[in-house]
Structures are given as structure tokens and as C-alpha cells.
Image (cartoon, helix red, strand yellow):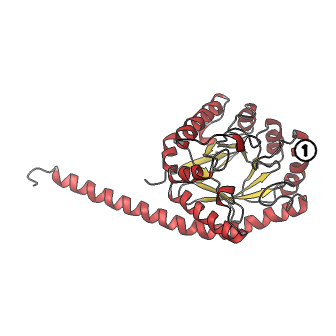
Amino acid sequence: MPRKHFEWKIRDKALQLGERTLIMGVLNVTPDSFSDGGKYSDPDRAFARAIEMEEEGADIIDIGAESTKPGAVRVSEAEELRRLVPVLKRLRNKLTVPISVDTYKAAVAEKALELGADIINDPSGLTMDPDLARAAGHGNAGLILNHMRGTPDSWAKLPPLKNPLAVVGPELEAAIHRAVRAGMDRKRLVIDPGLGFGKRKEQNSEILGRLQELAQLDLPLMVGPSRKLFLAKESPLETEFASAAAVTAAILYGAHIVRVHDVKLMKAVVEVADEIVRAQADAAATAAGIAGSSVSRAGRPGSS
């Protein structure tokens, strides 16, 4: 099925989604991220990494100041802002690509938007702070609704899902309704199935393989498989190859945006996957044209 095109409204501009896959580069300014914990907790190093990711081809920079790895303990609003604000101040008007902030707290979102952020990426899908949608709406921001099952400190205790999409789809739909009721324009929303967010290893693979089922929600789709624990291998290099495979699968099954750590490497992966998607779309269009022509000829008087 061809990937639908969308215009994603963020602040006073719009991003075109569907013609090619956009790359969201991850910038963790936390001391405890499972991928790069502490590496960019210094604001100057975080600033330099954001600039570097834009040069490497990132279309969006996603900054997170609170870890959502399995078992992570929540941090206070004050602590999250202490980590985040210096980075946003340094980056203000320094990037040509939009800045996204990964947070579930309305007050943090408000401050981030005040300091120039364009997008709020809510890992909880509005389950932790329902006021977040109102804050994003007031700021005319883009809002990403990520599906989270339980909370990071409870994931290890959750039973497996018999049918992951039967849970993820309806719960994302409920999050969309909550956002719209709070005043968000649907054209500012993107959904994310939340790989790794309370799902077992095999369930993440099933979600990837059935991504197209989420197209019925009629919103752009973001997927973030990069370096997730379900892809972990013996070495960082092997894990990066596993991430590349998952990113490719996400694009082939309909993702409009992929969230990755290594922008430079994944850009090459995305470009090849996009070529395959375009070839699929061209083949489908050609087949539809041939079928339409056959139907037209068959309907003419005297045709046989």
C-alpha cells in the first residue's frame, strides 16, 4: 500500500511527509540514557552534537532530558528543566531544522516552546500529564503521541500481549481523541507505536511487521527502533546493523519519520529504503493504470 502524504503543521510552518522519510536525530542530555547516557549532559557538547546532526542530514533534532529506559525513575520538573534549558538557550536560532523536546510534562513543554522548540514528543501518549496537549496546542506546536504501556519502572512486570496491535491501535486512537478534545488540530499530530515501551522483544517485531494497520488512524507515523533493547547484540556495531534492519522495515511498512541515534549511518539506510518505496509506488501506479485502461476498453460499445 502506497505511503500517504501529509502536511504536518508545526508552529508557523509545515513539514511535507511521505515523499521521503524524515530523520529525527536523538540528543539525550541525561546522565542515564541506556544508549549514550552522560555523553551530552554538558550543554556545550550537546550544542555541538545538535549542529553536527543537522550537518549529517537530520531533519529534526529531538532533545530528551529524562530517560525512559526500562526501570528508569522519574525526575522532577525542576531537574528536567535544569538539564534542558541551557541546551535550548544555546541552540535558539542556531539550527535551520525544527527542535523537538521529548517530555510528558506540560510545564516543561511550555518552557521548551518559549525557548524555541517546535515539536513536543510525548513518550506517554498523554497518559502521564493530560495538560500536555493543551500546552502544545497553545504553542501551535507539533505533537507526537507515543504509545506507552505502563511506565518504565513497571515494564519488567507486565504480562505479554497476545495481540499487540489490538492494544496499540485503539490506545493511540484514544490519545488522538484526548489531544483533539484539548484543542489540538489533527494536522499537528503524529503517532508512534512506541517500540520497546512496555512491549516484549517478539511483540516489537510483530508491531514492525504490521505497521500498515495503523494507517487507518489517518495520521503520519513515526517509528523509533534505533538501539532499542530488543535489537541489542553482542557489540555496538552489530546493534547498529540490527537498528538499520529495523529502520528499513519501518520505512517499507509506512513510517514517515524514523527516530535514530547515528544520523550519518542511518541516512544511507533511509535513502535506500526510500528508493524501494518509490519503486513500489511506481509499480502500483503502473498496475492501476493498466487495470483502469482495461476497464475503460471493456466498457466501450462493441468491445469484446
Question: Would you identify the image quadrant in which residue 198 lies?
Answer: top right
Q: Position of residue 159 (x, y in %)?
A: 63, 40
- Mark 1 lies on a secondary structure that is helix
Q: Is residue 184 above or below residue 212?
A: above
Task: Identify the residue shown where x is 56% and y is 38%.
Answer: 167
Q: Is residue 217 left or right of residue 148?
A: left
Q: Is residue 5 left or right of residue 46?
A: left
Residue that sits furthest to the top in the current view: 181
Is residue 21 shown to the viewer in this render? yes
Q: Position of residue 4 (x, y in %)?
A: 49, 50
Is residue 141 shown to the viewer in this render? no
Q: Which residue is mark 1?
A: 79
Q: Is residue 113 left or right of residue 159?
A: right
Task: Identify the residue shown where x is 63% and y is 57%.
Answer: 258
Question: Would you identify the image quadrant in which residue 36 lies?
Answer: bottom right
Characterize the local packing of mark 1: few (<14), some (14-19) or many (20 or more) Cα atoms within 10 angstroms: few
The mark total stands at 1
Residue nearer the viewer, 265 or 10: 265
If the image is split into quadrants, where does the C terminus sit? bottom left
Task: Identify the residue shown where x is 48% and y is 62%.
Answer: 277
Residue that sits furthest to the left in the current view: 302
Residue nearer the viewer, 165 or 263: 165
Label 1 is placed on what type of residue?
Answer: Glu
Q: Is residue 125 above or below residue 62?
A: above
Q: Position of residue 162 (x, y in %)?
A: 54, 41
Question: Would you identify the image quadrant in which residue 265 lies?
Answer: bottom right
